[in-house]
Image (cartoon, rainbow, N blue to C red):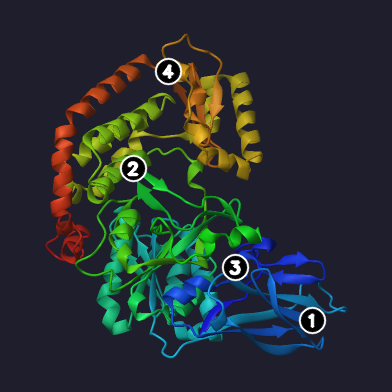
Amino acid sequence: MRLQNIRFPEPDICREEELYFHRNGEWIDFNGYFNLFYIEKRKKYTNQETLTLHLEVGECQAVRLMHDETMIREIELSGQPEPLTLEFPYQEIDKGVFWFSVKPGISSKSDVPQLSGWYEGKCQEEKPVRIAAVVCTFKREPYVLRNLKSVLRFLERPENASMNLCYWLVDNGRTLSEHEEISRLTDQHPDTIRIIPNRNVGGAGGFTRGMIEAIEEKERLGLTHVQMMDDDAVMDPELFVRAYGFLGMRKDEWEDITLGGSLWREDFPYIQQAAGEWFKEFVVQNDFPLADLRDFHVCTDKYMCEAVHKNMPYSGWWCCCMSLNLVRPDNLPIPLFLHHDDIEFGIRNQKAGIVFLNGFGVWHKGFELTFTGVNTYYDVRNTLITTALLEKERSQAEILRWIWKRITVDIIEFRYGEMRLAYQAFYDFCRGPEWLYKTDAEKLNNWLREQVAMKPIENLEEELGAEEYRRIKQYADEYRDSYKVETVDEYFSPARKAANLIKKVTFNGWLLPADKKIIALSPVESPFQAFRKKKVVLFEPFSGKAVLAKREWKQLWLACGLYRDAWRLMKKHKTAAEKYQKEIQKFTSMDAWKQYLEIEKGSKK
């Protein structure tokens, strides 16, 4: 069985050479992240018995087989194009990585050898695998078309035909069928592509609609897995090769293991944002953040190689493949609209196991590049739901402090809309699961969007005046142009959230005379940089949007009122948390979801 192909940089996917190979004197080491073969995960979760490297080489002098940094053997070559079949000592080694190195021919026209190849594994009995990849989208036709074409090109290759991959587009915006090219491709490939119109009920509703489709088609199509995928992410369809290869050899005791997807940054493609996260104390935790995958030693770190992590992770739904024995009519996600649907569902089903394979993932824009805005509401409300279900030990005092903290972070940076949304989220949580299920999610989302709005930075010229606007605009442009990995590091650093005593006791300078000089702050910078400021321009460096925020005393008094109201709500919080724990299963069944999505006659309006 083909387990993974040898990959090279591609302009439309990833150009970072060191993610694929490294130049080492006369040798080209194929020990980049995407071309490593991780051993321990295969040993634990699969019945694989052998590992063979198949190569078609051009003008090459020699090939080396490697384990970690040790050479296994070196094979002299003729210097002529030839096929090679090379065996790794898979049975003898339990940990680390296998890879190979090639010495190009003396007369070769390129310093990078012309070759192609793949890793093959064998086991006594292969399991049937058929995946339904589900892409949830809302009016993002350019992204959808890009990935759709990429997948179809991939499936046209003879070696991929046997996959019988299903690629389904859940259309929350109900616009895909109106797109001429997407519609044409769908008609040309009816067995592969399917457009599924859906209510606009966020990612949770879109992915669940795809799950329902997969459940209902499971027997007829022979489906075994459903794979959630973001619509606006960049992907290499090679990920399907790795999914099919791994799942086809999985052990019986890991029959329903989840394939978790890694998240790489679109702006810095060599940076791995996450490969498994976990949830504790209201916060998403990451044990191996911002890993530079160009570095062989980073790629072979214990965290990257081990089959089981100390803290059991879940996978974000940017790319996540789950067994249809887990995704069942009686076990579907919570209708959260967006955010935390993947967290709760992943943790709910984590007993089946999870593994993260190199190359199984996507590139996505950094989440820190925009202010939380509307997502403040979903982050707070859904964190409370997740905590009620998964961390019942959290005390009322801990929860109240967390709510107060969310309000405080927003008020010190003059983000009054988000401040109100944080409280509204708490209030709505206290309404319980019945309210969550019955509320019009699309109408609610539209209302939330009206509460926080940023505009093109050019609109600030009239508010700021020509000279002040030029200064702020120049700063924003320079900030964008100088944005680097170190800037991202600063965002995730604990120092960003730290404040000295003066900032704390004066409410970040609210109780001190105002500094009238206007500064500009991005989402990455610490909110405490607004210390004593009277006005601040909050700008998003890559969206081009901004807003002029001002110190307003009435908003501070409102915040004090929200602190009081949140305290008063704590009794209702306890009742709501108990209802979520006792009643949530009523709203995660197939019947409940079909009514929610208005799939069947007689559903709610």
N-term-proximal mark, 4 vs 3: 3
- List the residue tagged with mark 4: 551
Circle 2 — which element?
loop
Q: How many marks?
A: 4
Circle 3 — which element?
helix
- List the residue tagged with mark 1: 60
Tell me: 414 left or right of 83: left
Label 3–label 1 contact, CB within 8 A:
no
Label 1–label 4 contact, CB within 8 A:
no
Amino acid type, mark 1: Cys
Q: CA distance from mark 4 to mark 3?
A: 50 Å
Q: CA distance from mark 4 to mark 2?
A: 29 Å
* Vertical arrangement, residue 433 with respect to residue 328, above or below: above
N-term-proximal mark, 4 vs 2: 2
Q: CA distance from mark 2 to mark 3?
A: 33 Å
Q: Residue at x 44, y 26 (%)?
A: 413
* Vertical arrangement, residue 114 with respect to residue 430, above or below: below
Circle 1 — which element?
strand
Dot 1 alpha-carbon crowd within 10 angstroms: few under 14, some 14 to 19, many 20 or more: many
N-term-proximal mark, 1 vs 2: 1
- List the residue tagged with mark 2: 282
In percent of width and height, residue 302 lies at 54, 60
